[in-house]
Every structure is written in C-alpha cells, then in structure tokens.
Amino acid sequence: MTVTQSTCNICSLACNLDFHVEGDKIVQVLPTKDYPVNKGFSCIKGLMIAKQHNVFKPSPLPKIRNENGQMEEKGWKETYKYLTDKLWRIKEEYGGDSIAVISTGQLPLEEMAICSHVFRNFLRGNVDGNTRLCMATSVVAYKQSFGFDAPPYTLNDIELSDVIFLIGANPVVAHPILWDRLRTNTHKQLVVIDPRRSETAEKADFHYAVNAKTDIYLFYGLANLLIERDAIDKKYIEEHTENFEGFKDIVKDFSIEMVAEKTGLAVADIENMVSLIQNGKNVSFWWTMGVNQSYEGVRTAQAIINLALMTGNIGRPGTGANSITGQCNAMGSRAFSNTAGLYGGGEYDDAARRKAVCEALNIMDKQLIDKPTLPYNVIMEKVTSGEIKALWIVSTNPRHSWTNNETFAAAIKKLKLFVVQDLYDDTDTAKEAGVFLPVVPGTKKTGVYINTERRLSVMLPVLNKAENEKTDYEVFYELGRELGMGRMLDFWKTPKDAFEIMKQCSAGMPCDITGVTYAALAGSAGIQWPYPEGAVLGSDERRLFENGQYYTANKKARFIFDKPVDNPLPTTAKFPYTLNTGRDTVGQWHTQVRSREIALAQDSYSKEAYIYIHPDLAAKYGIANNEKFLVSSINGQSAKFLAKISDAVKINQLYAPIHYIETNKLTPSLYDPFSKEPSYKTTPIAIAKI
C-alpha cells in the first residue's frame, strides 16, 4: 500500500489529505495529521473525495455534436483537428476578441497559466474565471487599498483574536474546518453580521440581523463613533496610511440614529459593536460572499478594511481585514491566470512587468497579450450581441451558476462554437455543448494550489490515468500544438515546467514564489507567499504587513471610500420581498455536480429546489411546509420551490440555496461597478400559492 499526501480541490482552505492506495484503488482517505490548515480534520466533502468522478464518469473520449444534433464519440486527434479548424476560421473572420474562455478556481495554477497562454497570448482571446462570481470584489478592494491583491492573514489568526467579526459569512456550512478552528478559540467574543440567522449566527455571542445591503452604512457609522470616542490608533494612521482625513469627513454624517434606521438595528446594538472594537486587543474582521456578491461590494469591503486600519488591527496576531476565499485555487487564479493582470501580478501597460513576463515565457513583447480580459459579464453580453463567436467552458457550470441564468441559455444558441471541458458530460452546461472534452479529476493530476491564506500546496496523482484519459493541462498543451504554437510551447511540456515559468514571473512581486519547489511542497506543511529564492521559512503561519509596509508607491495603505449608492433594484409594490442566496449544508457544493456523488451527504437535503420562508409570511399566503409555491423575480423569471418554513429568515426575506438551477433563474444582471461581480444577494421577488 502506498500513502500520498495531496490537496483537496474543493473549498478555499485546500486541506491536505493522505490517500491510501492499493492496486490502483483508493482504499482510505485520511486528513493529514500535522498540516497547519486542517490539523488532522476534514469535512465530509474532503473525506469522500475518492468517490467523486466514479458514479457519473463519462467515456474518456471526446464528443462532437453531429448534423442531427446527436453527440458522437471521436478520437482526440480528430477532435483537436476539428477544434483547430473552427478556432482559426473564427479568428480569421472575426478576430481574437471573438473567442472567449470561462475557467474555474478549481484548477491548479499551472493549468490556468497554460490555458491563458494558448487562448490569450496566442489566439488573442478573452479568458475570465468563475472566481469573478465570488472573489473579484475582494481582489479589487485589496488592490486599491493595499496596492496588491494581498489577503493579510494566516488562518491561525482566527484562533488568536479576542473579538471576531464574521460579516456575510457562514463557515459552519461553507468552511467547516475554519469553523472548527474558530470554536477552539475559547477566549473570543464572536459577532456575526448577517440578515439571516445562519448556522454560524446561532452559535455567535452576538448576531446582528442587518437589513439587506446596509452593511456599508453600519461600517461607516461604526467608524464615526470610534472617531468620536477617540478609539482609533492615531500613530498607526499617521505612519502607515493615507487619506484618513477624507474618510473622517465622509463618515461624520453617519450618526448612530441614521445608521440604526438604515440597518434596522437598535442603537444599543451599534454601541455594543463599537465597545467590542474599542476594548478588543486583537480584533479581526472576516467576510465572504455576503459582502462580495453585491452591487456595492468593493466599497463595502473597503469599509471593513478601513475599520481595521484606523484601529491598528492589522499586521498583528489575531487581527486583520480578512477576505475568506470561495474555491480551492481562487488565489492561484487571481495571481497566475494572465487574465485581469499579468502572470504574477502587475498591469498590461507596465513596460517593466511586460519585459519580466516575456523573459520568463521566452517570448517577444508582441506575443504577450496587451490588455486585460473582458470580464465575465461583458463576455456574456458580447455572446448575446453576436460579437463573441466561440465560447470554451472549463470545469464550471454557468448554465446553472451564472446570474439570471436564462440569459446564458439564450446566449449560447448564438455561438458558432461551444466547447465544454469537464469531469462530467451531464451538467446543465455540458448538455448544451457542441463539443465535450472529458478530463480527469484531481486524483490523477499534478499541480499547485494557493489557498485563502496564500498557502501553496501541491496536488500529486494518487491514481494512474486509464487509456485515452487526459488532464486539463494535456488538453491545453496538445491543442496548442495542433494550433501551431510551435516554440511558444517549448518550455511548457509539463505542469512542473509551467510552475517554473510562473515562479520567474513572480520574481520581485508581492506574491514572489521563486523559493518554492515541487520537492519542498511534497509532504510538507505548505508555503505561504511571499517566499522568494533564498528565503528561510521561519514559521508555517506568516501574515503580511507586520512591518506596516504596504505595496503602494509610498508604502502606505489607502483609505478608499465613497458615499453609499441607492439600491439599483429596490423592492416595489409588485415585488415586495427580498431573495437572498447562499450555501445550505456542509455536504452540498456549488451546483452539486461533484457533491452529488457523496451518498451520505445527499440524505441531508432535498433533491428538489427549496427556499426558506418565515412562518408569518407563509401563513399569509396559506403555504404549508414542503408545499411547492411560485417565486417571481423582478428580472421577469419565475420558478417553483418547496417551502421550508423557518424563523431564521426575516418576514420580508426568503433564502434560497445556490445549489439548484432555479435559484439563479431569479437573480438579476446587476454588477459591482469596480469588480463586475454579480449582485446575487438582494433580488426583489413576489410569491404566490399554486
């Protein structure tokens, strides 16, 4: 029997697991005992990862839809030839901008890198990821405030805080290993800010059920009160930040009475939060999708960052303005996908960065793409308008997960080429493909993941590939060869080669990983960036900004702010209620195409779409528990849900799990102006008994 330590490629913690293999069969999966992320524990999704891609496993050969609309199995060589002919024809007639890829945060960074090398640098197309749906807001907030996309914390900080704010986050369900670490902190006071009494809110010392999308009013009000009480760190503000006076000027109008009226909280609740921050020695602020997925997400995230900066709660143990990532390699996607920024960070119009990346890739400047990708929403708008002719989907399910998802269904009918590359051929998206490319799961591939705290860990194959099976890396590499990339692929033969290139791209950047090797990662505790060549790993837990130096030109953090904007889609007389969305059980994951193979977890949730509704609202419409009723959205769509009667939601709010296609049938085409992240959380709806 062999035992191989590898990485779970599901949620953003990227726990490490020990795979026990005998006769090319996984006989047991155990959490890696001393790994600093999960410390010998795992959630059900990780423990059952060996069973994934077994029940719904497609043929290892690709399929092409024929003239009769049927999918026909083809050989890989024939399929590459078909795709190459199609792509070149489209590029020659409509230009590189007519080609687009939507990728995922669940691929290793090497696969993301080669995907963009093929589709951006060579074909001159657009490549965005489904990380746009979850993390774009935090990326922009950090870049504007700190000068780089740099989550400052280590997960150990949640065990060292004496006051913890969780904002729009439900780790009991979404990040159970993080929750396990939080609950071992016996000296903390836990504050949960969430419109819904979530599983995490149930266990908090204080739950503040703010009105939907009023968080920014609350944080500006807290800032104003802290300033009035002189409960700020003037020395830190003076030495390590800029533009505090401008922030102070804008928040002075956010009186406690105004904030109470806006948020629906009592004055005493707001005063208590101020006291907790004022009296806390190590205060940490943690947020996730409840903040990010908003029409005003970036400025709300920065309002949280501002609270940490003005109170000096950053760069010290147990502190920080800490965004919790969604997917296992969203951080790798952010830094090494060559999409919104160059490999390793930096801008496309920065001559010095372009030179460094070109040298790492061994290409000329004219071969490196010269502009950021179109964001996901614009890609879909251009598919709808007919400007984008070829769309390639990689290991994501946007027919289900894209906001206002009926618009995706309509858009793809206009494409000349629609390719889906995935583990499964029966997802809502794969069913619509003109070409389907099957790939293997993480148990058969090699690559590096960067988790929510900037920790690199390596995924190693624990099973052998069968005949005709291919990794995503092999598909992109072989496609590039067929396309005629020639010498542009000379240094990309293996994932390890790609990692070495990405290391060179990172040199001298905040995310410098030039000191990391596959050998150092194998069987290790992982390594957080930055880790430049020659560095010595002093600890497995390293946070940023301990010296008060940020990544801006003057090394100071910026206070970034704007006056709050009015909700672009308020409730109306016709649509008087608010739909909120999110995860629901530990066993469910995104669109359920992976977690459906965990039989034990499936027993905990309904196979049909359901929605939580307050008892009084249900009684008003005569809706009984488990009765199906109609929910209509301001976007013009309607869907049926089973009623789950619960007083965990407010009377004017319903909560639908994201795991069902019906949910995003109802969400609007509305985006944050800076991050372009969809506003999934506050959709005006109406309900009716059937």
Image: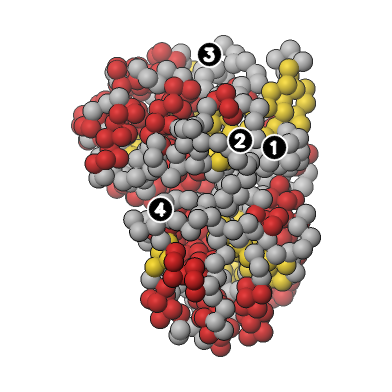
Between discs 3 and 1, the one toward the N terminus = 1
* Residue sitting at x 25%, y 45%: 349
Report the residue marked by disc 4.
551
Left or right position of 334 against 375: right
> The residue tagged with tag 4: helix, strand or loop?
loop
How many angstroms separate mark 4 from mark 2 (CA)?
Answer: 24 Å
Residue 140 point in image, percent of width and height:
42, 55
Q: Which amino acid does label 2 sit on?
A: Gly
Q: What residue type is labelled 4?
A: Tyr
How many angstroms separate mark 4 from mark 3 (CA)?
Answer: 46 Å
Please tell me the numbered disc located at residue 526: 2
> The residue tagged with tag 3: helix, strand or loop?
loop
Between discs 4 and 2, the one toward the N terminus = 2
Q: Are marks 1 and 2 in contact (CB under 8 Å)?
A: yes
Report the residue marked by disc 1.
35
* Residue sitting at x 53%, y 72%: 233
Residue 47 point in image, percent of width and height:
74, 35
Please tell me the numbered disc located at residue 592: none
Report the residue marked by disc 3.
468
* Residue sitting at x 59%, y 29%: 521
| Front position in the image: 166 or 380 | 166
